[in-house]
Image: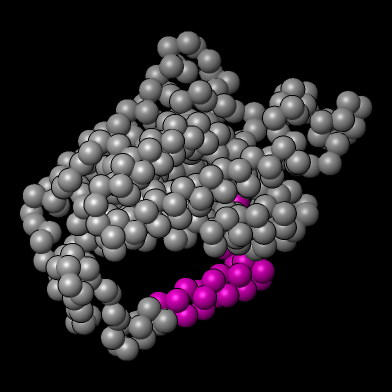
C-alpha cells in the first residue's frame, strides 16, 4: 500500500508510490511498447491484411481499397500514425477536461468537489507532452491522416483537384491549421497552469483572495474552451472525413471527452480511497460523480442520435455515409457478414 504523509493540514496528502507499484507501472509500459513493436512487425509482414480488406469490402467502407493501395507510407506506418493521433486526441481531451472540471467547480461555487480537485488538476499534466506529440505526428503523418493535405487537391486543373475540399481552403490550409492547433493547446495549458498555481497558493497562504481569482480565471477559461473545444473537434477529428460535416460535432466530441474525464476522475478517486488516501471522501461524493457520468452519458447518446435524426428528417442521404461507414464496418466485423444499411 502507498505511504500516506500529512502536513499540518489534514487535506495535505502526498502520494508516495512504493517500489513494487513503480515496478508494475514500468512493466505495463514495457508491455505496451513490446505489443506496439509486435503489431508493427506483423503489419509490415502483411499478416492480417486479407482479413482487414475483406471486412472493409463487406462493409462498403473502402477499407479494402486502402489495404490494396499502398500509396505514401507503408500500411503499418499509417496504422501507427492513426493510432497515435486518435489516442492522443482522446487523452488530451481527458487532460483538458481536468481543467474544465476545476474551472466549472469554481464558477459554480461548489464545495463538494474540493476533495477531488487535485485529481482533476493532475489530469491536465498531459497537455504539454500531448501537444508536442500531436504536432510531431501531424507534421510526420499529415498526408496519411488528412485527405485535404494532399498536393494539388485545392489546385484547379490538377489531377487531385477536389472542388468540395477547395471550397474549404480558407479554413483548411496548413499554416492556419497549425496556428489554430498551437492556440488551442496553448490556451488550455496556460489556464491549467494558472488554476493549479492559484490552488496551491490558496492552500499555502489561506484566505479568499486566491479563491476569487480562481473564479475569474475559471470563468474566462470556460468561455474560451466553449469555442476552442468545438473548433478543435472540427480540426482534429471531423476534417479527417473532409467531405462530411455536422454542426453538432463539436458538442458530440465535448460530451465524449466530458464523460471520459469524469470516468478518469472517478476511477482515480476510488483507487486512492482504497489505497488509504482521501479519507474524507465518502459515498456521497462518488454518488455525485456517478450521477454526472450517467447524465452526460445520456447527453452523449442524445447528440449522436440527433446528428442522424436531422440527416434523416432532412432527407440527406449523402450525409448518411458517416453513419453507414461506421455502423456497417462494426456490424460486418462483429458478425462476419455483409450488412446492408
User: Is 47 part of what is drawn in magenta?
Assistant: yes
User: Does residue 10 appear left or right of residue 125 in this picture?
Assistant: left
Magenta-highlighted residues: 28-53
Q: Position of residue 209 (x, y in %)?
A: 30, 47
User: Is 233 part of what is drawn in magenta?
Assistant: no
Q: Position of residue 293 (x, y in %)?
A: 24, 43
Q: Residue at x 61, y 43 (%)?
A: 183
In this view of the protein, which residue sits in the foreground, 317 or 35?
35
Which quadrant of the view contains residue 269? bottom left
Q: Residue at x 50, y 31 (%)?
A: 227
Q: Residue at x 28, y 74 (%)?
A: 15
Which quadrant of the view contains residue 79? bottom right
Farthest residue to the top: give it.
314
User: Does residue 215 appear left or right of residue 221 in this picture?
Assistant: left
Location of residue 159 with respect to 90 vertically, above or below:
above
Q: Main secondary structure of the magenta part?
A: helix
User: Does residue 100 appear left or right of residue 262 in this picture?
Assistant: right
Q: Position of residue 107 (x, y in %)?
A: 30, 37
Location of residue 80 with respect to 242 vertically, above or below:
below
> Quarter of the image containing the N terminus?
bottom left
Q: Position of residue 330 (x, y in %)?
A: 44, 44
Amino acid at each position: 500500500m502507498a505511504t500516506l504523509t500529512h502536513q499540518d493540514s489534514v487535506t495535505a496528502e502526498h502520494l508516495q508510490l512504493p517500489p513494487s507499484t513503480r515496478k508494475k507501472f514500468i512493466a505495463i509500459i514495457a508491455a505496451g511498447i513490446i505489443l506496439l513493436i509486435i503489431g508493427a512487425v506483423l503489419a509490415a509482414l502483411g499478416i492480417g491484411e486479407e482479413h482487414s480488406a475483406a471486412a472493409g469490402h463487406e462493409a462498403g467502407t473502402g477499407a479494402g481499397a486502402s489495404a490494396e493501395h499502398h500509396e505514401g507510407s507503408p500500411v503499418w506506418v499509417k496504422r501507427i500514425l492513426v493510432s497515435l493521433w486518435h489516442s492522443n486526441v482522446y487523452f488530451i481531451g481527458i487532460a483538458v477536461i481536468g481543467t474544465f472540471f476545476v474551472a466549472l467547480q469554481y464558477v459554480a461555487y461548489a464545495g463538494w468537489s474540493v476533495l477531488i480537485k487535485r485529481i482533476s488538476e493532475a489530469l491536465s499534466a498531459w497537455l504539454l507532452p500531448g501537444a508536442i506529440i500531436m504536432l510531431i505526428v501531424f507534421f510526420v503523418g499529415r498526408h496519411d491522416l488528412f485527405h485535404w493535405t494532399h498536393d494539388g487537391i485545392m489546385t484547379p486543373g490538377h489531377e487531385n483537384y477536389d472542388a468540395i475540399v477547395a471550397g474549404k481552403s480558407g479554413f483548411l490550409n496548413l499554416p492556419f491549421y497549425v496556428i489554430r492547433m498551437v492556440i488551442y493547446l496553448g490556451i488550455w495549458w496556460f489556464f491549467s497552469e494558472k488554476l493549479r498555481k492559484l490552488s496551491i497558493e490558496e492552500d499555502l497562504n489561506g484566505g479568499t483572495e486566491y479563491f476569487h481569482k480562481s473564479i475569474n480565471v475559471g470563468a474566462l477559461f470556460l468561455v474560451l474552451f466553449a469555442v476552442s473545444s468545438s473548433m478543435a473537434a472540427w480540426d482534429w477529428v471531423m476534417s479527417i472525413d473532409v467531405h462530411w460535416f455536422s454542426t453538432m460535432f463539436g458538442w458530440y466530441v465535448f460530451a465524449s471527452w466530458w464523460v471520459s474525464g469524469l470516468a478518469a476522475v472517478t476511477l482515480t478517486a476510488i483507487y486512492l480511497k482504497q489505497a488509504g488516501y482521501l479519507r474524507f471522501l465518502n459515498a456521497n461524493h462518488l454518488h455525485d460523480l456517478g450521477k454526472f457520468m450517467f447524465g452526460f452519458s445520456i447527453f452523449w447518446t442524445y447528440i449522436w442520435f440527433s446528428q442522424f435524426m436531422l440527416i434523416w428528417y432532412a432527407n440527406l442521404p449523402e450525409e448518411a455515409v458517416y453513419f453507414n461507414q461506421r455502423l456497417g464496418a462494426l456490424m460486418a466485423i462483429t458478425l462476419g457478414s455483409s450488412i446492408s444499411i
